[in-house]
Image: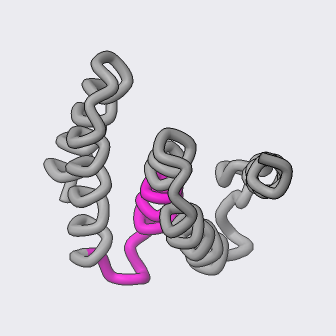
Amino acid sequence: MVHLQNLATLLKLRFDKFDAILDLDEAIASHRKCISLMLNSNTRKALSLQTLGLLLKTRFSRLDDIPNLNEAIPCFEKAVQLTDDTHSKASLPDNIGKWAFNQIQAIRYH
């Protein structure tokens, strides 16, 4: 699983450098596969779901494609569910709600 996560990280870096949407698509696919292999009890699953959500958010921002946003939201919801009280929920981005609100406002008034 670590290899899939590392692959996804490198693909995202290449996307950031060259803006090749195929790299972003492959990074998303790698994270999806990694998550599908993890048990809910895996302490890294919440972080992987968060990362997948961020990748989907990036693709939504790039393509303005609502299904990406619709898929990103449950990723963050599941990450919060998997993060019990003994783990810090502070590591989950607290600005996602603000970001989502701003995106919806931009779409509404676009």
Task: Give the camera-side residue of 41 and 101.
Answer: 101
Task: Give the camera-side residue of 6 and 73.
Answer: 73
Residue pictured at 30% horizontal, 43% vertical = 24
Q: Position of residue 50 (x, y in %)?
A: 52, 57
Q: Is residue 39 magenta?
A: yes
Task: Give the camera-side residue of 64 and 33.
Answer: 64
Q: Residue furthest top?
A: 17
Residue pictured at 49% horizontal, 62% vertical = 68
Q: Is residue 100 visible?
A: yes
Q: How many marks?
A: 0
Q: How is the image coloured?
A: one colour
Q: Is residue 54 visible?
A: no
Q: Relative to residue 42, is residue 110 depicted above or below?
A: above
Q: Residue furthest front?
A: 110
Residue pictured at 64% horizontal, 80% vertical = 81
Image: magenta residue range = 38-54
Left or right: where 18 falls relative to 1? right
Residue pictured at 57% horizontal, 64% vertical = 66
Left or right: where 101 falls relative to 18? right
Left or right: where 24 falls relative to 61? left
Q: Position of residue 23 (x, y in %)?
A: 23, 39
Q: Relative to residue 20, is residue 18 depicted above or below?
A: above
Q: Position of residue 1 (x, y in %)?
A: 19, 59
Q: Is residue 62 magenta?
A: no
Left or right: where 100 falls relative to 31? right
Q: Position of residue 71 (x, y in %)?
A: 51, 71
